[in-house]
Amino acid sequence: MTLTRAWRNAPLIAGGLIVGIVVLTAALASFVAPYDPEMAVPAQSLLPPGPHHLLGTDASGMDVFSRLVFAPRVDLLIAGLGTLISFAVGVPIGLVLGYGRGIWSDVGMRTFDVLQALPFFIVAMAIVAMTGQNTINVIWVVALVNIPIYVRLVQAQVLSHRERQYVRAARSIGNSRFRILWRHILPNVVAPAIVQTSVNLGWAILLTAGLSFVGAGVRVPTPEWGIMIAEGAGHLITGQWWLAFFAGLAASTTVFGFNLLGNGLQRILQR
Amino acid sequence: MWAALDYLVRAIYTTFGSLDAAAIHPVRATPMVIRAVLRRLVIVLPLTLASLAMVFVITRLLPGDPVFLILGEQSDAAQRAQVRHQLGFDQSLPVQFWHFIVNFARGDWGTSLVTGSPVMDDLKRTAPSTFELATLSMILAIAIGITLGCRAAVRPGGVVDVLSDLFSAIAISLPTFWVGIVAIYVFYVQLGMVPPPSGQMDPSIQQPVFRTGMLLVDSLLAGKLDAFGSAFAHAILPVATLTFVLSAPIVRQTRSEMQQALASPYVEFAELCGLPGSTVVRYALRNALLPIITTIGVLYSITLGGAVLVETVFGWAGLGQYAVQAVTSSDYFAIQDIVLVTTLFSVVVYLAVDALHALADPRIRH
Amino acid sequence: MSSAQPLVEVRDLSVVFPTDQGPVRAVEHVTCRVNRDEIVGLVGETGSGKSTLGRALLGYVRPIGRVTGGQVLFEGQDVTRMSSGKLRRWRGSKASIIVQNSRSALNPVETIGSQIWAVHKAHAQVLQDRSAVVEQALKEVRIPDPQRVARSYPHQLSGGMVQRVLIAMAIVNRPRLLIADEATTGLDATIQATVLDLLRDLVTSERMSSVVVTHDFGVVWHYCSRVMVMRGGVIVEEGPTRQVFENPQHPYTVQLVRASALGSRSA
């Protein structure tokens, strides 16, 4: 994985750049934002983009640009933690299911096959409704929904590597199953899992935004892309497009960045 | 009890689960086709139970008191205790689960706290609209996605390839609801090409008699063309939005599978035999479609989620909008039943598509 | 040893493949011929360019290859410069090929019958009755129970059977030239012999010519009247089989002959 090869990898650079900018923005939001993102100034509500408010203001007079700059904190936090948890839970399950033999292992595999067919958005909404609308619960929901993805990915990888020569060789000289998993199979599994993680981060952001949009995610007035779009939707007909537009643009660009990054990572890690 | 479950699972599995013809069991004489379909049918019952269990866990066992949600924050302990007893929440878990299953089977699905009517009636009223939206969008997305993906793979580097690659890469990054909102702004607010996004039909036009619940179908059945026209116009943007979002993953997968198929030895051999180009593409497509069929089964769950978002944006009175309303007003029974119905439906669709795949692939069939 | 016009004449042909490590010259300035009514062996090891040359006789240089010089004259027409439409009509009707990995050469989701029919339909001037054509083709390659086989899928047949199906597809339109590209490599010895016998019988009875591409000199000895030895993209020696075998001139040929099973048995 030389530096020169990475340099020629356009998706990796572009994706990394986008993601990097977003993360930096989130981290340095307090310095970048000209206004307090939750400071309502009713007198200045619904102003179009202009010199004082780069991207305009919303119905409560909050500066759109400032909210936009603070929003990635919430979305990235939720997406990041949620994906991390699902990775930590899903990968071991996938390893066990993929390597095990016998009926229960089979049943487990088919269960996760079917699990991916569940209407995850509706289930996510229901769980948040039942447990309460706060950030922690949204994180748990994002984690839960993404677990089957990792399980199936890892399980498929393990299955394909399990019967290969080097694993059989290791088995024949008496390596324990655990040792084989750890030293031989896991390194090969990690690469596609990492690629998947980048893509999953993007999906997690879309899920979070979607949940918040319908009112089953993060609470108002937290600056969050989905919420901003929801607030902006009502004003669209009266012509105030800037509320919803920029938030969606920011979210889309971020997710696109994660997808590109995943693409780029795939080129390096999977030959 | 676990031993009994273990025995049951093993019995089902050894009877229908193994494709390995070397195993000896009494149903070996049954043709593979029947077995493939039966295997999926047999799984329906345990999956139904599992879905019920999942919903039960979500609605009763998660932290968060359902009674609290039902009565609201102003209730006192006595009121809550009474309701808890009324609903049977004070009984032991297995008993609760049993009542849960029995009620579901009986059709007693509770009453909506918001609409006041039985949830089942609400679902009957709203589900067809969502079905209409989702099915139209999926059909269009499949048609567009497969056509574009195929074309892109057959002419790599061509206009279709580059554009569809770009389009699908961007489209899978966009939030569905935002696409709808942008579409509304461009096509309604600015261009005035479509009616306002306020529901399925112009309220001034009389709605047709409720037959299937799908406005487009019902207005045609009743012969009311003005209603049909209005419903059609109102459906354009929602369907277009959902189609746009759904077609992206289909394009990508079709392109990838076709590329693989076109690089395979049988395609090369077909060319060496001098078969016409259209036949060669057809050969490749028939092979590429098999994994795509499975993906479409999974795509259905994404469609349902997308439908929720699209319905909210366009004021489409379907199951999605009902679900959002239920969630935001903590309509306990409605939430429970919506999750149950959509889960069961998704599982059935998935199994059906899976069976279709098995039937379509001669390697599995014979 | 006919002095009449050869069926195929290769003049100074060169084929290049672009690779990550630079262009590979698979065939370099090769001149040779295939006469009518003869079975020629094209022998060499992996990477010698024999498969490339064999396919070049069909005007096919694989998606990434390029002809950088020379001609391949098939009955006087240069297949390397033919339009793609004409070339498509050429392949499968004037000249056809049988490949090594037969099972993967067939479409797994179509029946044997429909695939044989597709080859016939692509080239026939007049379409005959489908089941008659398919059954006839399968009978010619001595496949028992042709009706059942026609309804079967590739994965249901044994390796030897699939190879015969490939032969059936290759001869259904009565081509002038049949190229067997490592057609029996990988098959059991007995099946190999059966398939090659079948091939020989068909070729001689239908007055076709055949090029047998192989790395096995034993195959050449038993089935080819003439042999061309190839190495590194160049034909190093050629001549009547017996003569080349008993009196190899080029050192590489000597090695090949010795390495083959026959070499250890010869006096």
Image (tube, rainbow, N blue to C red):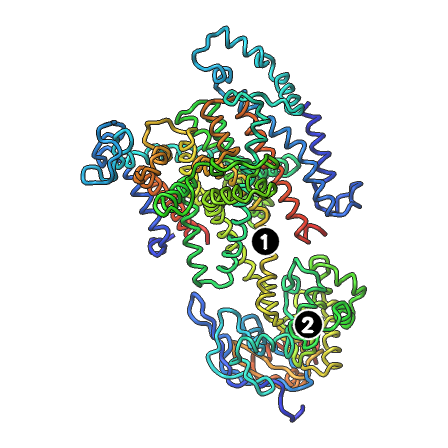
Q: How many marks?
A: 2
Question: Picture coordinates of residue B38 (x, y %)?
Answer: 72, 40
Residue B126 higher or lower than B70, as above or below: below
Residue annotated with mark 2? C120
User: Front-most of A164 and C161?
Assistant: C161
Q: Amino acid at mark 2?
A: His
Q: Residue C225: percent from the left, percent from the top? A: 68, 83
User: Is label 1 in a helix, a strand or a loop?
Assistant: helix
Picture disc at residue A75: none
Q: Which residue is mark 1?
A: B289
The kind of secondary structure element at disc 2 is helix
Residue in the image at 68% along x and 69% along y:
C184
- Estimate the x, y position of residue B319 in percent, counting from the top left: 53, 33
The front one of B323 and C13 is B323
Q: Is residue C25 left or right of residue C190?
A: left
Left or right, A190 with respect to C142, comes to: left
Image quadrant assignment for residue B274:
bottom right
Location of residue C225 with respect to C49 vertically, above or below: below
Q: Nearer the viewer, residue C202 or A78?
A: A78
Q: List the single residue furthest toward the top.
A: B78
Above or below, A112 against B145 in this view is above
Q: Residue at x 75, y 74 (%)?
A: C198
- Point out the residue furthest to the left here: A51
Q: Residues within 10 Å of mark 1 (few under 14, many from 20)?
A: many
Cα separation between marks 1 and 2: 26 Å
In contact (CB < 8 Å): disc 1 and disc 2: no
- Residue at mark 1: chain: B
Callout 2: chain? C
| Nearer to me, B329 or C133 | B329
The image shows residue A99 at horizontal and vertical percentages of 58, 40
User: Of the residues shown, which amino acid type is indicated by label 1?
Assistant: Leu
